[in-house]
């Protein structure tokens, strides 16, 4: 299986990992879902939700008594997966994410990671550039994907995922290029023949991959219970 390495992350193409996607619903309680990571000599990132004996692992996230998942260290990724005032926000759009994942054959954890980075699961989010909703759709993109109301969570998730599917097809299922194009535009990715040399885009790619593997690890943990 071909993989792509960007910033130390080795990622299998979307088309290959789609078959590994599980139902995207998160558990009601996350008290046992601490996430640990380890980078081996080849730069491959390994995840586990069980405290490992290997001293090379470090805890990325820990869960509070209320079941919310927080970053365990300061650094690039310090945002929380939820707020104490709205602990259900992460699960509120599960049905839409599952529907979009099945319809467009993309991992639910991948869609969830995009939503996390784009809007932190707030459907009324609006960027300074005019991007709207959970997946931060620009008006032209929303219109081209058949979205009539970008503030509607279901329409936004379906439209954003449809656009991800278009990008994945264009870049031969390459997950990294798909994510980069979602942020910087497909023309920029084509121009630079890879991830554009924009600090925002490179940080965005790393953030999405970071959350994607964290969410996928949670799904795997739930499936084993």
Image (tube, rainbow, N blue to C red):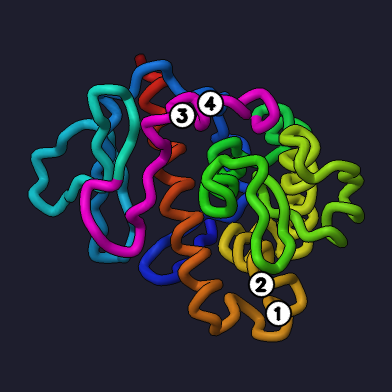
- Mark identifier at residue 188: 1
Q: Which residues lie in the magenta part?
A: 71-97
Q: Nearer the viewer, mark 2 or mark 4?
A: 4
- Find residue 184 and name its label: 2
Residue 80 magenta-drawn? yes
Q: Which residue is mark 4?
A: 91
The disc, 1 or 3, on the residue closer to the chain's N-terminal end is 3
Crowd band around label 4 with a 10 angstrom C-alpha radius: few (<14), some (14–19), many (20+): some
Percent across and percent down for residue 18 are: 62, 40
Q: Residues within 10 Å of mark 2 (few under 14, many from 20)?
A: some
Query: How far from the left and from the top, in percent, is residue 206?
Result: 45, 63
Measured as percent of width and height from the top left, residue 22 is found at 55, 28
Please, is residue 157 above or below residue 67 in the view? below
Of the numbered discs 4 and 1, the one sitting upstream in the chain is 4
- Is residue 219 visible in the rendered image? The answer is no
Q: Is residue 58 left or right of residue 209?
A: left
Q: Which residue is more in the foreground, 160 or 45?
A: 160
């Amino acid at each position: 299986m071909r993989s792509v390495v960007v910033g130390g992350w080795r990622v299998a193409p979307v088309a290959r990992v789609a078959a590994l996607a599980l139902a995207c619903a998160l558990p009601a309680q996350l008290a046992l879902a601490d996430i640990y990571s380890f980078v081996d000599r080849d730069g491959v990132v390994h995840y586990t939700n069980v405290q490992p004996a290997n001293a090379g692992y470090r805890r990325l996230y820990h869960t509070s008594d209320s079941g919310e998942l927080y970053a365990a260290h300061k650094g690039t990724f310090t945002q929380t997966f939820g707020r104490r005032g709205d602990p259900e926000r992460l699960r509120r759009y599960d049905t839409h994410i599952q529907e979009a994942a099945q319809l467009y054959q993309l991992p639910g954890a991948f869609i969830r990671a995009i939503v996390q980075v784009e809007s932190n699961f707030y459907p009324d989010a609006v960027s300074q550039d005019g991007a709207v909703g959970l997946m931060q759709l620009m008006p032209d993109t929303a219109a081209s994907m058949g979205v009539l109301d970008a503030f509607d969570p279901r329409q936004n998730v379906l439209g954003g995922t449809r656009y991800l599917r278009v990008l994945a097809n264009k870049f031969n299922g390459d997950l990294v290029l798909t994510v980069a194009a979602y942020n910087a535009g497909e023309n920029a990715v084509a121009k630079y023949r890879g991830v554009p040399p924009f600090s925002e885009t490179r940080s965005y790619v790393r953030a999405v991959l970071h959350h994607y593997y964290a969410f996928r690890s949670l799904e795997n943990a739930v499936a084993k219970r």
